Amino acid sequence: MPSLPRLARLAGSAALAFALTVGAALAQDAPKASTPQEAAKPAAAGETAGGWQTSISLIAPSKYPPDFKHYDYVNPDAPKGGTLNSAVIGSFDSFNPFIVRGTPAAGLATFGGGLLYDSLMEQSTDEPATSYGMIAEALRYPPDFSSVTFRLNPKARWHDGKPITVEDVIWSFNTLKSLHPQWAAYYKNVVKAEKTGDREVTFTFDQKNNRELPNIMGDLTVLPKHYWEGTGPDGKKRDISQPTSEPPLGSGPYRIGKFSMGKSIEWERVPDYWAADNPTRVGRYNYGRIDYTYFRDQNAAWEAFKKGGLDDYRIENISQRWAEGYDFPAVKNGEVIQKTVPNHSVANMQAYVLNNRLPKFQDRRVREALTLAFNFQEMNRTLFHGLYKRLDSYFANSELASSGLPGDRELKFLTPLKGKIPDEVFTKPFTLPDYDTANATRTYLRQAYQLLTEAGYVRKGTGLVNARTGEPFTIEMLGDDPSENRILEPYARSLERLGIKATVRIVDQNQYIDRLRNFDFEVASIPYYPQSLSPGNEQRDYWSSKAADSPGSRNYAGIKNPAIDTLINDIVFAKDRADLVAATHALDRVMLWEYYVIPQWYNDKVWLAYWTKLQMPKQRPSSASIDPYAWWVKGAGKDTASAK
């Protein structure tokens, strides 16, 4: 189950990976169903009783009862109004985030609805792998997880006042599956969506005992069928399969106001938002307006933050800047505050990603050699002020990370794959090179060169060539911001010591996104989509053989390995939490030993800097490190969508 990227300011940035899970719940005063229903109740972990429930959890019983009034950490009396200003890198050319073409505006999200749309259920900020009702006020599913039924909230409305219907839900599901390979993969096990009651929709699955499928359907973003099947101001029929410059109709807490295509966009708070009194909306979405301004690169955005009025807070992701850059006047006089916040999230894999579709990267010995050549310790010491930790897992900073040798429960998944996965999986703990030891550089480069020799490469002059074809070993490293030179060039220089001609190419962000979507790169520094504490069906989009051949998927590395496919299924069909953790350990361990990517580093803290116009609750959410939508603007007063 993925954590949904609802920190919408990042919608247009491929280089900056930070995501925030947010949630919503059943309104306390929601009208009773029009037909006799059994009382809804909160969910226990993996509950299979078949009765109506107001929440669903994959890990533990949900924290909040059906009649809770708001999240514990929010200020329910937070004033409404004022403007949140945010800087975004790059540009945008569309208000349609659900297709492969185009770059959507900040505030829109492929998963989770962003600021514009609501979903059936919403993931909680205050507990992992738990969702509460939003458009659906309750759900139920049978003990074998072969289907799930949602009961819609009769209060749910589009911004034009029309009710959100079962027909909207069914149309959204069928349409999204046809628009993007991510949706097709995410909903691949859903064979039917049908109306089964006046306000009930049932999704039937092609398999049983996939515990995550009810949660997955709760993530469905619901779109207005009547709007998309209607005609636009130009008199032409709207087409959701194409980019659009017309602000779409939504159902969420904000709607699009003024905009300058590619340069800026204003989001206006909806004054009569149907879910404003929903317990997980109380004390949240307080800004009267959210303004996004686009900048060409990270340096321009940084200057905008320092100036003030264009970017009210930033999550810093450059260690040198955090250590040395916050000495400008607004920091010295107390107008800007720096705060270090513990990071409770699974550390997403950030890596030099090898495009394994290319023949030169298909030999594991080559990939291992490239891993040995990366000197993290020197970069951390000379560039990062020693502030980062080395990533040695696809699920670092969590119980899902593998370590040591596999235990008995993990071996249950690994043993059937013997002969299909590296032998070292069973005999050696996975480790990455430690360049802080004596003679490390000479040792690791010698080992790397030996592996390249075994893989069929020889020295010719100062370069490395394929002994059979005579083709030089070259690598182009792709980036999307000039600041990436500082992390690409040191690695390129290390590879050149092996005779590999490595070059760095920086392109604009739109071109970078397009090249990643179409897997048109050799090596790229990529922060993967954040993982959750309950991995599941989304792993197919990250690592499966089918996703490797699907442009627009997140299998950037091009992994096509039947053993990996098997382990993904072991995760998807895990019978309980213990098996899920063990199967995830097994997947993690095999992918590490296959050397598909060269892991980089992570930060176990969030570096937050903000102008003091922003106020925030004393408590933080338990699951997410921060929740900017629970903040408010100092001096904000009367609730108005146009408040400054």
Image (tube, helix red, strand yellow):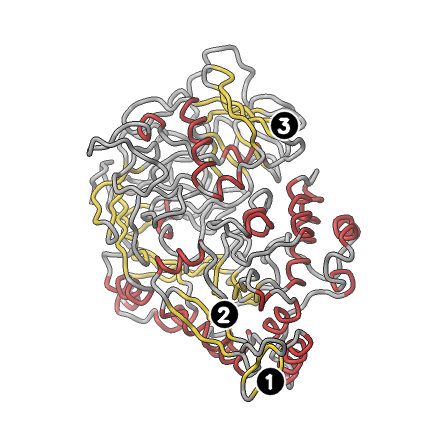
Would residue 362 be found to the left or right of residue 173 on screen?
right
- Of all residues, the one furthest to the front in this rendering is 469
- Of all residues, the one furthest to the bottom in this rendering is 461
Q: Earlier in the sequence, mark 3 or mark 2?
A: 3
Asked which secondary structure carries label 2, the reply is loop
Residue 594 image point, x, y percent: 65, 62
Q: Residue at x 22, y 46 (%)?
A: 259
- Nearer the viewer's eye, disc 3 or disc 1? 1
Residue 184 image point, x, y percent: 51, 39
Mark 2 is surrounded, within 10 Å at the Cα level, by few (under 14), some (14 to 19) or many (20 or more) other residues, namely some
Which residue was labeled with disc 2? 387
Q: Quadrant of residue 75?
A: top left
Which residue was labeled with disc 1? 459
Residue 412 image point, x, y percent: 78, 48
User: Label 3, label 2: how many angstroms apart (C-alpha)?
Assistant: 47 Å
Q: Residue at x 21, y 41 (%)?
A: 643
Q: What amino acid is found at the position of numbered circle 2 in the picture? A: Leu
Seen from the viewer's position, the closer of residues 255 and 398 is 255
**Residue 146's disc number:** 3
Q: Earlier in the sequence, mark 3 or mark 1?
A: 3
User: Label 3, label 1: how many angstroms apart (C-alpha)?
Assistant: 58 Å
Seen from the viewer's position, the closer of residues 402 and 472 is 472
Q: What amino acid is found at the position of numbered circle 3 in the picture? A: Ser
Seen from the viewer's position, the closer of residues 456 and 609 is 456
Q: Is residue 532 visible?
A: no
Q: Earlier in the sequence, mark 1 or mark 2?
A: 2
Q: Are marks 3 and 1 in contact (CB under 8 Å)?
A: no
